[in-house]
Amino acid sequence: MLFQSRTHTCGQLREADAGKTVTLVGWLENMRIVGSGLAFIVLRDFYGTTQLVAETEEMIARLRAINKESTVSVTGAVRVRASRNPKQPTGDIEVVPETVEVLGRCRFNELPFEINRSREADESQRLRYRYLDLRNPAVKKNIILRSRVIEAIRRAMWDHGFLEITTPILTASSPEGARDYLVPARKHPGKFYALPQAPQQFKQLLMTSGFDRYFQIAPCFRDEDARGDRCPGEFYQLDMEMSFAGQDDVFAVIEDVLPPIFAEYGTYDIASRPPFRRIPYLEALETYGSDKPDLRIDLTCKTVTDLFTDTGFEPFRGKIVKAIPISGCTLTRKQTEKLLADCEVQSGVKGYWVRMDEKGEPAGGIAKFAAPVWDSLKERLGLTPNTLVVLAAGDYAVKAAGVMIKFFGAACEGHMDKERYEFCWIVDFPMYEIGDESGELEFCHNPFSMPSGGLEALEKAACGELDPLTIMAQQYDLVCNGVELSSGAVRNHDPEIMIKAFELVRLGEEDVKKKFPAMYNAFCYGAPPHAGIAPGVDRMVMLLAGEDSIREVIPFPMNKSAQDVMMGAPGEVTQKQLDELNIRVTAFEKE
C-alpha cells in the first residue's frame, strides 16, 4: 500500500508512464526559474527524485511560496522530457503539476547546510541536525546498506541452523575489560544494574541450558573513548555461540557466512575464499608489527637488532630494531621523511631510512651508520637495487613497524591491492601478560577462554614448572583489511580449570563465585564444550561502504565526546528523579 493517495514514488516513473495522471509526495528539494512562465522543480522522496515543470505564473507563484525541504503532495500529468537525463533513473520523464498541497511546511528560509552536500559540513552540525543529514541520498545509502547486510546475516545464520535469541539489557556489572554504564535501581536503593558490555555470560548460559546454536544482532554498551573504527556508548555485533564445538567449527561458519555478504554488498566485489589464512599472534607481531595485519599490503618487517648492537648510531644502541624493505619505491627524500613524520604522530616512535642505490650501496638517510653492517643487512632483508628500507627502534618498535607498513604500503606503488577484502585469523593469543600499571600477571584478553594445555598447564605454572606467559589461549581474532572485526574463543567450561586460571591472577574460588555466580554454578551442573565469536556489525558495514569513520554507517551516532548533540544527551535530570533513585549529585570542579 502506498502512503495517502500517492500513486508512484519519486524513483518509479519511466517513459512508459507518459500520459498518466499521477500523485507524488516528497520533499521540495530545489526550484530553478527559467525566464518568464517556466520553472523546474526537483521533488525527492526515499526512493529517488522526479523533475516537475511549472508552466504557469500561478503554479510558479504557488511553488515559490513553499520553502525548500517542505513536504508536499503533487498531482499532475507525466510526459516525456524534451531534454533527457540518462544519469537519472527518472530522467526520461517529467511531471507537470496541476495541484500542489503542503503536507509539512519547513519554517526556515535558511538550512544549516545544503542537503545534497551535507557531508562537506562540519560534523557537529551534521550530528546536531542528523535528521537533515540523513535526507542526503549519499548518507542515507549507508543506512540502507546496513539494513540489507543485517538482513543477509540473519538469513545466513538461520540457514546454518542458528536460533535467534535476545538476551537482557539490564544486568549485573561484570569485569569485562571496559567501563560499565550503570543504571540505578529505584526499588533497590544503593544498587545498580549495568548495561551489558556484551552478551558473553548469557550466551554461555544458553549453551549450558541445552541450546545448540545461538545468535543475535546484539547491542553492546561500553563507556570508552571514540576512535575512527569505534563509536562510544553503544555498538552492535553478530553474537554467536555453538555447543559441542571448537575453533574449527566457528571458523567454518564464519568463512561460509561472511565472504558472500562482502562480495555482494561491498565496495569491492572480491573477498577471501575459505579457508582464511591463520597467523599466530606472536608471528603477526614479528612479521607485520600488528595483530591486525592488512594482507592487501605485501610488506613485512624483520628484526635486525643484533646487527646494530655495536653501532655508533645512538638511537639504535641497545634497542630493539625493526626494518621494512620496500622494493621499487620511488618516493623522494622529502616524501619519505613526510611519511615517517606521519608515522611518528601515530606510533610515537621516530622512524629512519636508508636506500640501496643502483650500485647496491647505502644512500641517503642513515647511510653513514648503516654502512658498517650493510652486507649483513642486505643479506638479512634480501635487498635489491632501488629498495627503500625504513627502520624503527625502541620499546615500541614493533608497533611503529606496523604503522610504517600501513603508511608506506599505501603510498608506494605496487605494494597494495586496495580493491579487495582480505580476511585472516589471528590465533594462539597469550593467556596472560604482565600489566603495564600493576606490574603483575593479568589476563591478556578474555578470562573465559580455555587455556591450551588445560588444567595441567595451569598447575605447572602455579608450581613454577612453567612460565605462565608461555600459556596460549584458545582465542582468535577475525581481521579484514587491517580492521579487527571480532574476537572469539573456545570457552573455559570446566569450573576446576576456571578457578585455577583465576588463581594465577590472585583471585580465589570465592572471588570467581562472587564475580560470576550464575556461570560458575551453571557449569557445575554439566556444561558442554562450546565456542563462539562476535563480529562487529558497525565495523563490517564501515568496510563494506568504504568509509573511514564508523559514524557514517550509524543512524544516530554520538560524537567523539560520547554526546548526542541532537537529543542533548547526556543531560541533567530533575531533583525529583534523583530523589526517587536515592541519588545525590555532589559538587565537582569542571576542568
Image (cartoon, rainbow, N blue to C red):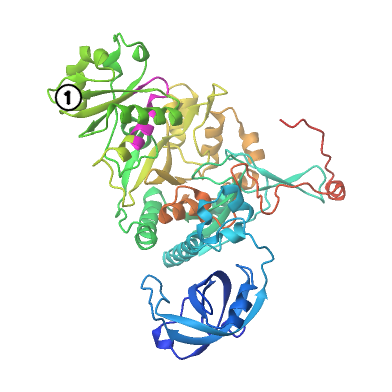
Res. 241 in view: yes
Residue positioned 33% across, 56% down in the render: 268
Relative vertical location of residue 25 with respect to residue 354 in this rendering, above or below: below
Instruction: Name the amino acid, label 1.
Output: Asp
Relative vertical location of residue 405 with respect to residue 30 in this rendering, above or below: above
Res. 401 in view: no
Direction left: furthest residue: 359
Q: Which residues are magenta?
A: 392-407
The percent coordinates of residue 567 (x first, y second) are: 69, 54
Name the residue that disc number 1 marks: 357
The percent coordinates of residue 155 (x first, y second) are: 45, 67
Q: Quadrant of residue 63?
A: bottom right
Residue positioned 25% across, 20% down in the render: 364
Relative vertical location of residue 544 with respect to residue 68 in this rendering, above or below: above
The percent coordinates of residue 451 (x first, y second) are: 45, 37
Q: Secondary structure at mark 1?
A: loop
In screen coordinates, is 574 left or right of 422?
A: right
Q: Crowding at label 1, few (<14), some or many (≥20) Cα neighbours within 10 Å?
A: some
How many labels were placed on the picture?
A: 1
In screen coordinates, is 219 left or right of 327?
A: right
Majority secondary structure in the magenta region: helix
Relative vertical location of residue 206 with respect to residue 510 in this rendering, above or below: below
Residue positioned 42% across, 21% down in the render: 395
The percent coordinates of residue 101 (x first, y second) are: 64, 80
